[in-house]
């Protein structure tokens, strides 16, 4: 398991459709050069072999930047590609099974959809909780009601884990998200659909760093 100070400040979750016809791997590398600190490869339509191949290619790109690669849902793909970890939702593999399947140094992130999920996760040795969705978002239509900022604050008061907020986050509201208890933000379209993924990531990262400095003064 990774240490609690793992840097997940700016987390990119990939969505090929959101890349507007541009190469996904190019978009990711541009974003990493702009300041993204972790990348989750999310593929709902690729077959297993193609998913593994894409994961391996992406890992090769991320390795020189020392940016971890997380695989969404698929533990088999994460192991085959030697990714840095996995992110699962509440309907995916239970933590107890997941923990046995993964080497101890791997990152585990789990989405929380309600207060019960948050309390249950307190007994687990995981790297972060994904607070999802924070706001309404068109990129995920199968999620529960949004947590909102007050929901995020409640979780931060209950949980020992790093909180990564996802869903409807962009440059205009990311500062508030951090003020309400998030350790970092995860974005999809705010970077993938930007005219310049590099510039979008750079501006988000700069804002997050400024917020962190302000919080510490």
Image (cartoon, rainbow, N blue to C red):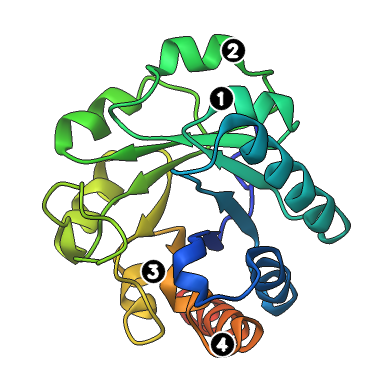
| Position in image of residue 3 (x %, y %) | 65, 37
Determine the CA span between mark 2 and mark 4.
Answer: 38 Å
Q: Which residue is mark 2?
A: 101
| Position in image of residue 53 (x %, y %) | 73, 40
Q: Which residue is mark 3?
A: 178
Q: Earlier in the sequence, mark 1 or mark 4?
A: 1
Work out whether residue 153 or residue 81 is closer to the camera in this orientation and state it: 81
Q: Relative to 127, is 182 above or below? A: below
| Secondary structure of the residue carrying numbered label 1 | helix
Q: Which residue is mark 1?
A: 75
How many C-alpha atoms fall within 10 Å of the one at disc 1: few (<14), some, or many (≥20)? some
Q: Nearer the viewer, mark 2 or mark 4?
A: 2
Q: Are marks 2 and 4 in contact (CB under 8 Å)?
A: no
Q: Residue at x 62, y 89 (%)?
A: 199
| Secondary structure of the residue carrying numbered label 3 | helix
Q: Earlier in the sequence, mark 3 or mark 1?
A: 1
Work out whether residue 155 or residue 193 is closer to the camera in this orientation and state it: 193
Q: Earlier in the sequence, mark 2 or mark 1?
A: 1
How many C-alpha atoms fall within 10 Å of the one at disc 2: few (<14), some, or many (≥20)? few
Residue 176 in view in this figure: yes
Q: Residue at x 33, y 70 (%)?
A: 177
Determine the CA span between mark 3 and mark 2.
Answer: 33 Å
Q: Are marks 2 and 1 in contact (CB under 8 Å)?
A: yes
């Amino acid at each position: 398991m990774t240490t609690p100070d793992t840097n997940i400040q700016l987390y990119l979750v990939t969505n090929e459709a959101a890349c507007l016809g541009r190469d996904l791997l190019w978009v990711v590398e541009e974003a990493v050069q702009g300041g993204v600190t972790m990348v989750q490869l999310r593929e709902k339509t690729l077959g297993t072999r193609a998913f593994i191949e894409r994961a391996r290619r992406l890992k090769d790109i991320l390795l020189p930047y020392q940016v971890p690669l997380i695989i969404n849902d698929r533990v088999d793909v994460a192991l085959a590609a030697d990714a840095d970890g996995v992110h699962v939702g509440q309907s995916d593999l239970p933590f107890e099974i997941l923990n046995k399947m993964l080497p101890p140094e791997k990152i585990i992130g789990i989405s929380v959809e309600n207060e019960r999920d948050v309390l249950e996760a307190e007994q687990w040795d995981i790297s972060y909780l994904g607070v999802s969705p924070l706001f309404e978002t068109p990129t995920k239509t199968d999620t529960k009601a949004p947590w909102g900022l007050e929901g995020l604050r409640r979780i931060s008061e209950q949980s020992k884990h790093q909180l990564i907020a996802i869903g409807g986050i962009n440059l205009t509201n990311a500062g508030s998200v951090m003020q309400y208890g998030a350790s970092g933000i995860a974005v999809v379209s705010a970077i993938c659909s930007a005219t310049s993924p590099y510039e979008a990531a750079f501006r988000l990262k700069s804002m997050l760093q400024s917020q962190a400095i302000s919080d510490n003064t």
